Structure formats: structure tokens, C-alpha cells
Amino acid sequence: MSGKYLGGVKPSRVLQYPVYLYMAQCKGTLRDLQLALQLKIEELRQRDALIDDLELELDSKDDLIRRLQEDLDRTRGGRQSGGAGGAEDTGVQPPAADEPQRTKRQAISAEPTVLDPSQLTDVTLKSYSKSKESSDLIQRALMDNDFMKHLEHEQILTIMDCMHPTSLTKGCCVIQEGDDGSTVYVLEEGTVEVTKQGKSLCSIGEGKVFGELAILYNCTRTATVTALTDIKLWAVDRQCFQTIMMRTSLIKHSQYTDYLRSVPSLRSLPEDILSKLADVLEETHYSDSDYIIRQGATGDTFFIISEGQVKMTQQSSPGDEQVMKTLSKGDWFGEQALKGEDVRTASVTAVGDVTCLVIDRESFKQLIGGLEDVNNKQLDSDEVKANLQAEADFFSSVSLSSFNTICTLGMGGFSRVELVQLKSDTSRSFALKVLKKRHIMDTSQQGHILSERRIMVEAHSPFIIRLYRTFRDSKYLYMLLEACLGGELWTLLRDRGSFDDGVTRFYTGCVVEALAFLHCRGIIYRDLKPENIILDQRGYVKLVDFGFAKIVGLGKKTWTFCGTPEYVAPEIILNKGHDSSADCWSLGILVFELLSGSPPFSESDPMKTYNIILRGIDMIEFPKKIAKSAANLIKRLCRDNPSERLGNQKNGVKDIQKHKWFEGFNWEGLRQGTIASPFTPAVEGPLDTSNFDYFPEDTEDPPPDEESGWDLEF
């Protein structure tokens, strides 16, 4: 019988063997191709990284050549002109003749939120019934709006649900120019006209949003909106909007942190690191039967299931795939990928629709580690402590009557700063910040002022203005400050137009040192800009005006909207909660402005400025005068995701200091004050105010305010 068949095997069996072998070879080839693809992708990634490094190295060499050429030009110029200095001597560029005149920018401070974050989950939001047509119109309007479209889908749905209806007849005023605003509107039926100072600007039709700036903070309406026809509106106020934004952010962050804490290898991490990891988790969606992980592939990603189920399978031999287990919400997989190169030992596929929270190894590595403790070591010495005690004893014996007022050095939104001279020692002068108590009460800034005092009393840094003593009377609060008579950096920038890399690097270095001092103590500054940076007699710069600074703590966030529009970070605009990473964003904006003469995000009104900020730094065309290494630093400081920003990762400020743009910079010399500043202001004596603009005397006599009692600790 066996002779009838080849080798005693039936023909059907003979045909089956090649098919089986062919399938096995195909699977093997597929695995090989996948592996080869992964290797090629990794090779390309390494090449891209190498190219980036080489480009930065080339930029630094270009900078060196440019600096050497400038030194050569100055030397030649000095020989020809007998050494007379000019704008070139300070490394700054004179402003172009057609550049607009720079004006000081006013910071914005929202009233403190009355919401207690710990009780937000218990707040009940009132919803209003709507037809499907109305709901669809509101959603479309919100999604089409330049600001609202950046909100999360869940937030948009909740805002739509909470909007209440209102109707007005033709000729009625919806918004009055000059009034305080707190409501945003969606127009469902009819048409409205927008006018400013009596002049028509435009008309708005159905399905449009208007008045959105009012839900960010208490602002004065800049235009009048009048009904041209009978209209139907949907409205939501600032309090409801802020509640929605804070609650969704807090609930999500708390949930993500709990997920991370349930992973055995992560639960021992400090709270501030878990908080940052929660911020960097990204939601990824999968459909039924989608492969999330394939066995045999290399991976660098860790997954936590937030919605749905997945199936984990393993193939021990071709055609033999076994289901190992099913994972559901709160479970995780791919953990080994965070520790090193991981060859996946099993496949994971979606069972129905699945949402995973994902973090890759590189992001994880950047965040694991604590904030660097950059406490000023000199404070540990007995000599420094003795000097501080002697200083405190001296200033405790002086009063307001111990000083003569010389002139005004500056004016801000809430105060003015006077130069005062000590009567008993005319060689000593100080800056006296004077704040009107009634104005503070009217603008609900009591908390900001008390926070400013608490922070500045302890801020013993050479890069932060010193606060020696505070006083009060029935009308004013007073802060006795160190007098830095070199003028404001804003004035120098206004007069020179822009700075070159070397000058900008020095001033930025001083600011980095100041922020490092604050951030390691859990303090955020929140109003970084040239107007708040002042030069001392040596030409070194210091941070001033701590009215918006706040002690938040490590790993904690705050929600009050404050800052100067061109400098505020996206998370402040979107009311997501912010921390010290908002200062990292502002630092990137500062570097851009010092190098180019103007900030990257600037429009005619705050809402337009906020909208272009939300589009991101990658949408900005950098001027050619900003070198690639500087542009790289700016873009890494201005990442949309706070956890990805340079200065907010495991090495803290060291990541900024080690960036290519700072290559060769003498950080220790800066701290010790031994390196020369790029510009030394001319200061003839303790009463020389020639580096400041002229300000008229304050003739307003505010009413006394002694009834509130809030300033008892001032």
C-alpha cells in the first residue's frame, strides 16, 4: 500500500506540509521585517538627534565667530575714535527708525477664586434643558470659537449644559462699553451690532460666541453690543465657567495620580513627581481588535487602561496563540518598557472601544527625580547669619519719619515707588513702595499683598530685590526696599531695541538664578517681563515686584488668573491650574523679547493675544537674528505641556543651565558676582535717578481705610 503514495504519505498530507512551512516562513519574515523596521526607525531617530546636536554646535561656533568679529570691530573702532563707546560697546542693537514706541504693559490680576478645590467634586452645577437643535448650535459655536475650541470635549459639553437662555428685543443693550463683565454669550437667533466709542465695528449673526474675555477675569467691556433684531441668547457666567474648568481638571488629575499610585514600582515616588507624571499622561483611543502591543516588537511605552478592556495573548509556536488574561479599567501593562529597551513578550488587543493613558520611556526618564535644592549655601555661614541679624536689628529701629522723600522712581498698577534718603546717614538711600489701601480693597488684592510681603522677607538672593521693613498708616502700606539705581531692563531694551546673544545670556542667567531660588522653595513668580527686572549699580539684574508671587508648594497647583497677557502660559488661560512651570514658559518669552525686541505673542487686545498663545510657539516665525540654539531653548521652555518644559523636569534648572545656548557660560562667576556685566550703568551717587524716567507727583489723596483689619500682620 505504501508504494502507491510518495513515501507512504497520502498526497493531501504532502500538500499540507509546504503550506504549513510557507505560513511559518511568512510569520517569521513578518517578525523579521517588524524588527528591521524598528531598528531602522531607531537608526533614523539617532541620526536626527545627531543632526540636531551638530546644528546646535554649528550655531555656537557661528556665535563665537560673530562675537570675535564684533570684538575685532570694536577694537578697530576704538583705535579710530579714541575709545569712545557707543551702542556696540554694550552688545545691543539700536532700534530701527520705524519701530513703534514701546509702552509699559499692565499686568492683569483676577479676583481670587472663591472655590475650594477640595470641595469642588461636591459642587452641583445647574443645567438648563435645550432642544437638540439648540444644543447642536451651542456646541458648534463653541467649537468654532478661537478660544473655546481649545477646551476639552467634556468641558464644552458641560458648559453647553449649564448655559441659561435669555431673550432681548430689538434695540436692547447686551453689553455696555465700560461696564464690568462676567458673562459670555452664544447668539442663537437674530443679529447684534458691535460698536466702540459710537463707531460701528461689525455685526454678529447666529451661532457666534462673544464676550469670552469676561469669563477669564473681571474686565471692563471694551465695546458695546446692541440687538439689531429681537434676539435669543445662551449665557454662562465666570463663576460657573471656572467651576467647570477647575473641577474637570482636578478630577482627571486625581484619577490619573491614583492610577499611577496603584502601580507597585511607582507608588514610592514623591507626590510632586506623581503629579508631574499625571500631567504628562496622554489619552490614546483604540477600536475593537486593534493591536496595542505586538509580541516580539520592541517598545518604549507604558499603558494604563482608563476605559474598556484588553486581551493579552501569547504565541508559543506558530498558530498556537493562547489568551493569558483580560485586563480592564485601572490595570496596566508594558511596565518594563519604562526601565529599558523592552521586547514585548505578549500581544495586547482591544476588546471593544478602549482608552489608555500612555507615557513613553523618554518622558518618564525626564521626570523621575526631585527638584534640585539650590539653596544659597552662603546663608549657612555664621557670618552671613550674623549680618542678617544685625540688618534686622537696624531696620527694626527706623520709622517712616526716618526718611526724606526724594522723587518717584516708578509707577505700577497698584503702587508707586519713591526714592527715599535716610536722614541719619545721607549716604544711604532706599526704594519705598507705597500702596493705597483703598485701591487694594477695591480690587481684592489683599491676599496678593500679604503673599508678597511673606515671600520677600525671606528672599535672601543676590538676584532678588531685598525687602527690609514694612510700615502702614490709615491710607497706605509701605515696603522699604533695596535701591537699585541702574534703571529698569525695560528702559534699556526700549532705548537699544534688542540685545545680542551675549547680553541676553547674562540677563537671562540672572533671572534663571532668581527663579531657581524661588522654585526650590515652592514659590511661583508669575509676572516675569523686562518691566520687572532692574539693574543694580554693577549692571547685574534683580527681580522686583512680587505682587503676583505665591507659595504653592512642590507638586501643588493654583488657579488664579494673573500675569501680563503676552507672558501668560496656556494652562493659565485655559484655567487648568498652574505651578512653577508657568515661569519656565515666561522665561522663554523673555529670551525671545530680549533677542528680538518684542514678544512672540502680541495682539491689539488681550483675547487675541491669548488665542495666538494657545496656537503654540511652533506657529511663530522666528526672526533671523535669533540663532538656532536660542530658538531651540525658547521652544523647549515654551512647550504646551508643562511637564515637557525645560526647567520643570528631573534636573530642574540644571537642564536650562546645561543647554547648548549657555555653553561656556560662567555660572559660578555669575553667582559670586565676579564676571563683568555687559552694561554698567552710570550712577553718580545714592540720589542719582538719571537712569529712570520722570514721573509726576501723586496728587490723589485716598480715603483712610482702618476698618477692614486685614493689614494687621503687615
Image (cartoon, rainbow, N blue to C red):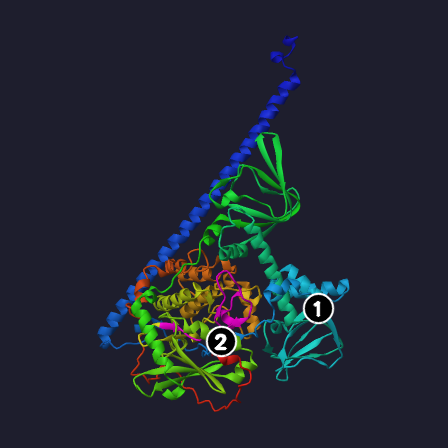
* Residue at the image position 31 percent from the left and 81 percent from the top: 683
Please report the bounds of the magenta region as a residue range.
541-570
Queried whether the magenta region covers residue 687, the answer comes back as: no
Residue 427 image offset from top left, x and y in percent: 29, 84
User: Where is 292 relative to 432, above or below?
Assistant: above
537 left or right of 167 in image: left
Q: Residues within 10 Å of mark 2 (few under 14, many from 20)?
A: some
Asked if residue 335 is positioned above or below residue 429 in the image, the reply reads above
Give the amino acid at mark 2. Leu
Query: Farthest right residue?
Result: 131
Specify few, some or many for label 1: CA neighbours under 10 Å numbering under 14, 14-19, or 20 or more.
Answer: many
Q: Is residue 310 left or right of residue 392?
A: right
Query: Residue 317: x, y in percent?
Result: 57, 29
**What secondary structure is the stretch in magenta mostly built from?**
loop
Task: Identify residue type, mark 1.
Answer: Met
For the residue pair 154 and 481, the one nearer the viewer reads as 481
**Mark number displayed over residue 450:** 2
